[in-house]
Amino acid sequence: MTYKTTGYSATELIYNIKISEGLKLLNNIISQDRLGQRFKYRQKVIKILDLTIIKVKAYYDANYKTLYFQPSDKVFLRLYYNYRLAGDGNRKFI
Protein backbone atom coordinates (compact mmCIF):
# COMPACT_ATOMS: atom_id res chain seq x y z
CA MET A 1 0.00 0.00 0.00
CA THR A 2 1.62 3.22 -1.12
CA TYR A 3 0.70 6.56 0.38
CA LYS A 4 -0.31 9.45 -1.84
CA THR A 5 1.77 12.03 0.03
CA THR A 6 5.09 10.18 -0.16
CA GLY A 7 4.56 7.66 -2.94
CA TYR A 8 6.11 4.92 -0.78
CA SER A 9 4.75 2.27 1.56
CA ALA A 10 5.55 2.31 5.27
CA THR A 11 8.06 -0.54 4.89
CA GLU A 12 9.89 1.31 2.12
CA LEU A 13 10.20 4.41 4.30
CA ILE A 14 11.45 2.55 7.36
CA TYR A 15 13.56 -0.27 5.89
CA ASN A 16 14.32 1.20 2.45
CA ILE A 17 13.29 -2.03 0.69
CA LYS A 18 10.15 -3.29 -1.01
CA ILE A 19 8.77 -6.33 0.74
CA SER A 20 7.12 -7.56 -2.45
CA GLU A 21 10.49 -7.85 -4.22
CA GLY A 22 11.67 -10.58 -1.87
CA LEU A 23 8.37 -12.42 -2.06
CA LYS A 24 8.37 -12.38 -5.86
CA LEU A 25 11.37 -14.70 -5.82
CA LEU A 26 9.18 -17.42 -4.36
CA ASN A 27 6.95 -17.47 -7.45
CA ASN A 28 9.51 -19.37 -9.52
CA ILE A 29 9.35 -22.36 -7.17
CA ILE A 30 5.56 -22.59 -6.91
CA SER A 31 3.44 -24.27 -9.58
CA GLN A 32 0.90 -22.27 -11.59
CA ASP A 33 -2.19 -23.53 -9.71
CA ARG A 34 -0.90 -22.10 -6.44
CA LEU A 35 0.12 -18.71 -7.79
CA GLY A 36 -3.29 -17.15 -7.24
CA GLN A 37 -3.43 -18.44 -3.69
CA ARG A 38 0.12 -17.27 -3.02
CA PHE A 39 -0.74 -13.81 -4.36
CA LYS A 40 -3.74 -13.52 -1.99
CA TYR A 41 -1.63 -14.52 1.00
CA ARG A 42 1.13 -12.16 -0.03
CA GLN A 43 -1.30 -9.24 -0.22
CA LYS A 44 -2.65 -10.09 3.24
CA VAL A 45 0.85 -10.29 4.68
CA ILE A 46 1.82 -6.94 3.15
CA LYS A 47 -1.30 -5.29 4.60
CA ILE A 48 -0.64 -6.81 8.02
CA LEU A 49 2.99 -5.65 7.97
CA ASP A 50 1.97 -2.13 6.97
CA LEU A 51 -0.60 -2.00 9.78
CA THR A 52 1.90 -3.36 12.28
CA ILE A 53 4.47 -0.75 11.32
CA ILE A 54 1.85 1.98 11.67
CA LYS A 55 0.91 0.68 15.14
CA VAL A 56 4.56 0.55 16.25
CA LYS A 57 5.13 4.10 15.02
CA ALA A 58 2.00 5.32 16.83
CA TYR A 59 3.16 3.61 20.04
CA TYR A 60 6.62 5.17 19.73
CA ASP A 61 5.20 8.63 19.03
CA ALA A 62 2.85 8.37 22.03
CA ASN A 63 5.42 7.11 24.54
CA TYR A 64 8.63 8.88 23.57
CA LYS A 65 9.29 12.56 23.37
CA THR A 66 12.15 14.52 21.92
CA LEU A 67 14.31 16.25 24.49
CA TYR A 68 15.66 19.71 23.79
CA PHE A 69 18.48 21.24 25.81
CA GLN A 70 19.89 24.72 26.07
CA PRO A 71 23.66 25.28 26.24
CA SER A 72 23.51 26.12 29.98
CA ASP A 73 21.39 23.07 30.99
CA LYS A 74 22.91 20.42 33.21
CA VAL A 75 22.20 16.86 32.13
CA PHE A 76 23.25 13.41 33.30
CA LEU A 77 25.14 11.58 30.58
CA ARG A 78 25.02 7.82 30.95
CA LEU A 79 27.91 6.23 29.11
CA TYR A 80 27.88 2.60 28.07
CA TYR A 81 30.34 0.10 29.45
CA ASN A 82 33.95 0.80 28.37
CA TYR A 83 33.17 4.29 27.04
CA ARG A 84 34.87 7.26 28.63
CA LEU A 85 34.89 10.98 28.17
CA ALA A 86 37.91 12.44 26.44
CA GLY A 87 40.60 13.40 28.95
CA ASP A 88 39.54 10.86 31.59
CA GLY A 89 42.35 8.58 32.65
CA ASN A 90 42.14 4.86 32.85
CA ARG A 91 40.06 3.89 35.91
CA LYS A 92 42.44 1.04 36.59
CA PHE A 93 45.20 3.50 37.54
CA ILE A 94 43.11 6.07 39.46
Image (cartoon, helix red, strand yellow):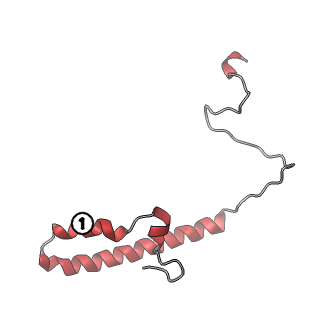
* Residue extending furthest toward the right: 72
> Where is residue 64 shown, x and y percent of the image?
66, 62
Q: Residue furthest bottom?
A: 4
Q: What residue did someone put label 1 on?
A: 25
Q: Nearer the viewer, residue 27 or 62?
A: 27
**For residue 30, what is the image quadrant?**
bottom left
Residue type of the residue flagged with mark 1 = Leu
- Identified at 45% across, 73% down, the residue is 50
The residue closer to the viewer here, 50 or 6, is 6
Left or right of 29: which side holds 51?
right
Front one among 24 and 6: 6
Q: Is residue 93 left or right of residue 15?
A: right
Whether residue 52 is situated above or below residue 85 in the rendered picture = below
- For label 1, the crowd category at 10 Å Cα-Cα, with few meaning under 14, some 14 to 19 and many 20 or more, is few
Image quadrant occupied by the N terminus: bottom left
Please report the residue visible at 33 percent of the width from the left and 78 percent of the height from the top.
43
Q: Residue at x 35, y 73 (%)?
A: 45
Q: Residue at x 48, y 78 (%)?
A: 7
Quadrant placement of the C terminus: top right
Counting from the top left corner in percent of width and height, residue 53 is at: 49, 69
Q: Position of residue 17 (x, y in %)?
A: 40, 65
Give the answer, above or below, for where 3 lies relative to 74.
Answer: below
**Number of numbered markers:** 1
